Image (cartoon, rainbow, N blue to C red):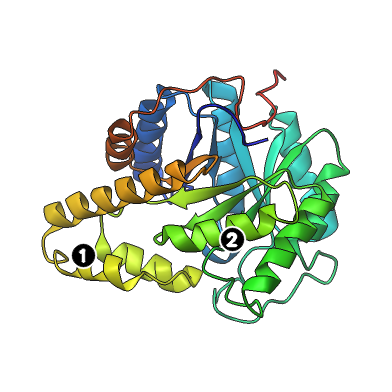
Amino acid sequence: MLSAPSPSISFEFFPPKDDAGEAVLWDAIRRLESLRPDFVSVTYGAGGTSQDRTVRVTERIARETTLTPLAHLTCVGASVAALRQVVGLYAASGVRNVLALRGDPPGNVGGAWVAHPEGLDHAEDLVRLVRGLGEFTVGVAAFPDVHPESGGFEDDVEVLVRKADAGASFAITQMVFDADTYLRLRDAVAARRDLPITPGLMPVTNFKQVARMSQLMGTPLPEAVLRRLEAVSQDPLATREVGVQIAIELAERMLAEGAPGLHFITMNRSTATLEVYQSLNLQPGSPSGRAGLVERSEV
């Protein structure tokens, strides 16, 4: 479980698009490896793209580093047979921790969701599938600012409870820019189920980039945050400074309020994440996994 005397720290990366991007990614991985995070994850691209690269990078992390990888897996465009195959590839590489996601509609993140005719329709179904394939620890996504397709806050709480009932042992949120929305969701779920929810935190270094991500994810930037970033949007260095400070403030508040940890969305860059980490006076973790994830297994 994500509960311990010290907070769980984890890092999220994106699969590179080319060789240059892969070099940047691995530089970030190696720099952040020294902090001994509880785990690291590699996402799929928008709309479920880049699955092959995600699997490859995750496998390489398992083979070539001391890090514990959390493998992303989505239902997008995949039959149950294909999902079983991907889980098998992960397991063969010693990966025993999976983040089970329904995923966004391919080609149009804001479009209507259509399941593969031989696939799964909900993340809770994917949780059950993975848990039935072996000794896996399974995490899921949480949406403090309400999922774009949900009927509202209470629906989101109910969905998280069902995911926990299906076998999920923790959740990670979309990027958080309003600590109150995170705390509201965490407390509502805690009243019904023991499901640790770790907030996703992204130090902003590029205003246009975060604005686009916010739109795609359906995660609105709070007015107070928007004003601070817009005021320096023409100055890259000032944007970075303000973005890092906002992340520090959010992290301090959420940790003070009992968040089980922080999941840093790195955008494959290490410097801003390191600055936030160091400002919080966090101590390096341990490969034993305060987060309750299965340690890397030798294959």
Instruction: Assess disc 1: are there few (<14), some (14-19) or many (≥20) residues with their C-alpha within 10 Å of its C-alpha.
Output: some
Q: In which quarter of the image is the N terminus?
A: top right
Can residue 267 be seen?
no
Q: Which residue is drawn at 47% across and 42% down?
A: 262
The amino acid type of the residue labelled 2 equals Leu
Q: How many labels does the image show?
A: 2
107 versus 80 height, above or below = below
Instruction: Assess disc 2: are there few (<14), some (14-19) or many (≥20) residues with their C-alpha within 10 Å of its C-alpha.
Output: many
Mark with earlier residue (2, 1): 2
The amino acid type of the residue labelled 1 equals Arg
243 versus 37 height, above or below = below
Name the foreground residue: 73 vs 141: 141
Q: Do the residues labelled 2 and 1 touch (CB within 8 Å)?
A: no
Answer with the quarter of the image where residue 231 lies.
bottom left
| Whole-percent x, y for residue 66 in the image | 53, 20
Q: Residue at x 49, y 29 (%)?
A: 37
For residue 255, side relative to residue 155 (left or right): left
105 versus 197 height, above or below = below
For residue 260, side relative to residue 78 (left or right): left
Q: Which of marks 2 and 1 is in front?
A: 2
Q: Residue at x 56, y 31 (%)?
A: 60
Residue 167's mark?
Answer: none
Name the foreground residue: 170 vs 270: 170
Residue on which the image places disc 2:
185
Q: How far apart are marks 2 and 1 (CA)?
A: 25 Å
Residue 228's mark?
Answer: 1
Name the foreground residue: 207 vs 142: 142
- Badge 2 element: helix
| Whole-percent x, y for residue 11 in the image | 47, 39
| Whole-percent x, y for residue 137 in the image | 74, 37
| Whole-percent x, y for residue 120 in the image | 81, 64
